[in-house]
Image: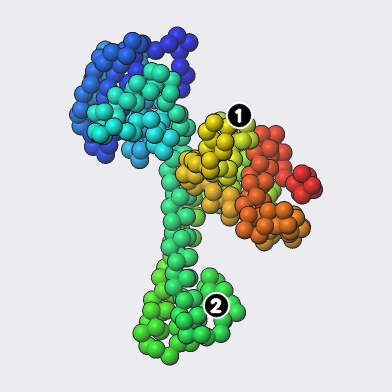
Amino acid sequence: MRFSSKPPLAYGGIDLRAWMLDVCILNHDGAIMVHQHFKANPETFLQVIAPYRDDLVVAVECLFTWDGLADLCMREGLALVLGPALDMTAIQGGKAQHDRMDAQKIAALLRGGMLPQAYVYPAAMRATRALLRHRVHLMRTRAELLTHIHHPTRQDNLPERGKKLAAKAHRHGGAERFADPAVQKRIAVDLALMGHDDERLRDVERSILKAATPHNAHTRYLLRTVPGIGELLSLGRLDELHEIQRFPRVQDFVSSGRLVTCAKASAGKRDGTSGATIGNASLPGAVSEAAVLFLRANPAGHPALGRLEKKHGKGKALTVLAHKLARAVYAMWQRHTAFKMPTFLTG
């Protein structure tokens, strides 16, 4: 959405909840033109802003209900600014905190140019991205079941099976190893739930691949040239980032993925870090998974990890490798080139 070259004459701050809207419109001098609280529906919203819509910029906090308002503004040709919830600490403070006050503060921050901006993700790809994120939730539930199955083995001091229970072919006889019938029942239930989760995961993954077919096929191919990044992981990265052009520098890219920490300093002295929760919450897991799979599918990467362990220690080496891999992905995406292993290992 494009902004006009002339400054807007009205700034609309909106505090959006599940069923209610609080709209505050300020003029260029900061005077309140409208401040209303009403049920969230498109007709009422358009009626309230009708006298000011020609020169209005709408700002809303990035809560889970922002999608409908963003789509409405797009259809109506209204300029929209989306403020990330974790970045908007300027609206906090004071003894009172409520929707009416938040709406006015959002409008004031927008008028003063102090409102941080989030990316308005395209409506056509939101459903696929949500399904990818739901797959992560299902994978974590399945991992918890695996943990519950392994715990009794260690509690009873039994020898390890030597086979991964993640594979369906290795689960037969898993409950009969234990003497207590209650433990057998617990393991049998977990194994049955894992089988059900496997079926649901396969069904979700088929739906994801079908829905993602129209997405950027060339970029997906480039991402899959990185050892360990498969079809679903490449889709996860592509759907979370969408366009690499929205990151002017590689530092912005890795910062959005929570791969760097923000320094806090005062009077020229550094005092710890902050901002660990700012950025895309889904990217750190995808980058970490890519780093682990990179090592698993690529023995040539092990010497690079060894060098990082000598320099940074074992606890930090994998994080540094993930950071380095993210920077390589940024360069590939920007230059439209495939992954080059020698360049990565020597860079």
Viewport quadrant of the C terminus: top right
Q: Residue 142: horizontal and vertical position, in percent? A: 45, 65
Please identify the residue farthest to the bottom as the structure is shown. 179
Residue depicted at 40% across the width and 84% down the height: 184
User: In terms of secondary structure, where does tag 2 sit?
Assistant: helix
Locate residue 299: give its quadrant.
bottom right
Mark yes or no: residue 32 visible: yes
How was the colour assigned to the protein in this rendering? rainbow
Going from N to C along the chain, the mark reached first, 1 or 2, is: 2
Locate residue 217: give its quadrant.
top right
Residue depicted at 46% across the width and 60% down the height: 140
Badge 1 amino acid:
Pro
Q: Residue 177: horizontal and vertical position, in percent? A: 48, 87
Taking depth in this image into account, of 102 and 282 the one nearest to the observer is 102
Dot 1, crowdedness within 10 Å: few (<14), some or many (≥20)? few
Q: Residue 314: horizontal and vertical position, in percent? A: 66, 59
Residue depicted at 36% across the width and 84% down the height: 182
Mark yes or no: residue 280 visible: no
Q: Nearer the viewer, mark 1 or mark 2?
A: 1
Report the side of 297 relative to 110 (left or right).
Answer: right
User: In terms of secondary structure, where does tag 1 sit?
Assistant: loop
Residue at mark 2: 170
Dot 2, crowdedness within 10 Å: few (<14), some or many (≥20)? few
Badge 2 amino acid:
His
Q: Residue 87: horizontal and vertical position, in percent? A: 43, 35
Residue depicted at 49% across the width and 44% down the height: 276
- So how many labels did they put on this image? 2
- Say whether marks 1 and 2 touch (CB < 8 Å): no
Residue at mark 1: 248
Mark 1 → mark 2, Cα distance in angstroms: 48 Å
Report the side of 64 relative to 346 (left or right).
Answer: left
Locate residue 90: give its quadrant.
top left
